[in-house]
Amino acid sequence: MLYQDTVESEALVHKPWFVASIFAAVFAVFLMFNLPGTSFGELMRPVIGDPVQSGVYGRFAIAFVIAVMFCLNLVLIGFAPLKMQIGIVWFELLLLFLAFFNSFNLSLPFIAENLPYLITQGLVTTIYVSAVSLIFASLIAIIAAVAKLSSNGFTYGIASFYTSFFRGLPLLMQIYLIYLGLPQLGIVMDAVPSGILALSLCVGAYMTEIFRAGIQSIDRGQWEASRSMGFGFGLTMRKIILPQALPVIIPPMGNEFIAMLKNSSLVSVLGVWELTFLARTSDRDRVSACVG
């Protein structure tokens, strides 16, 4: 089936109507952008003249060239084996990203000067906050998952309200509620514990459903067999249910940890010295030094 799909896709790439459709779509998209003022517009100077004054003609010429290059690239890649096609596309996209990154006119010496500090202080803090939050989120998720599987209406109500509330409220709002709201009740927490608590509660709400689904994936007969052997609830969960549910739980837990690493940038609003906060502070110092 995979070989047949590959052959059909290669045949589709080499059909004139398909290439013409792609050309028209790419040409129309880039015709709407004002590209003459970009570095690519400077490369087209021998054709369009002064990029700033090229107007509609410059945009038309640049869009035409890009569409031709895109379609030619698409056709030529179609002759290569599948794995080579994937590698070529990855390489080309990486080059485009580096070109986009280069257009920011960043100060590479300034980045190189501050990079060790960002890694030793910011990266370590980011990983520390995320790892500790994941541990607490897992504990919260296990308790809430068991509560949602309970036939007790009180525990189920608390667990369902918790998951619905923290999954529906933006994480930034949760951070502010904990850091600025708890002191109104007499509970004062530093920035790092507040960020960890907010991440734990937020991610724990999502992981609750992961643990619940993992536990429910185990056949009901496992519970009945353990009860017939005289095992209590805690021993059954620890020795029988969770070991079998972990292969189902761990992959989505990895996804949640990756998401938490990215969401940990939000705790920078509290002044936590993680990557985003240090990068922003360093950039502000650079701008102040330039102005001064």
Image (cartoon, rainbow, N blue to C red):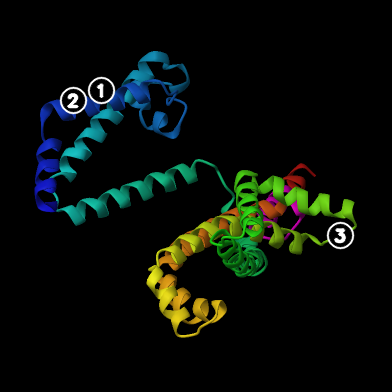
Which of the 4 image quarters holds residue 75?
top left
Asked which secondary structure carries label 1, the reply is helix
Name the one closer to the observer, 280 or 176: 176
Name the one closer to the observer, 120 or 132: 132
The spot of residue 202 in percent (x, y) is: 63, 55
**Residue that numbered label 2 is attached to:** 20
The spot of residue 30 in percent (x, y) is: 36, 25
Give the mark nearer the N terminus: 2 vs 3. Answer: 2
Q: On the picture, is 246 further left or further right than 184?
A: left
Q: Which residues are magenta?
A: 269-284
Q: Residue at (9%, 39%) from the top-left corner?
A: 11
Q: Residue at (13%, 46%) from the top-left corner?
A: 5
Is mark 1 in CB contact (under 8 Å) with mark 2?
yes
Q: Is residue 187 magenta?
A: no
In the picture shown, does residue 68 fall above or below 162? above
Q: CA distance from mark 1 to mark 2?
A: 6 Å
Name the one closer to the observer, 261 or 283: 261
Q: Is residue 273 magenta?
A: yes
Q: CA distance from mark 2 to mark 3?
A: 66 Å
- Among all residues in the image, which is located at the extreme top? 56
Asked which secondary structure carries label 2, the reply is helix
**Residue that numbered label 1 is attached to:** 24
**Residue that numbered label 3 is attached to:** 187
Asked which secondary structure carries label 3, the reply is loop
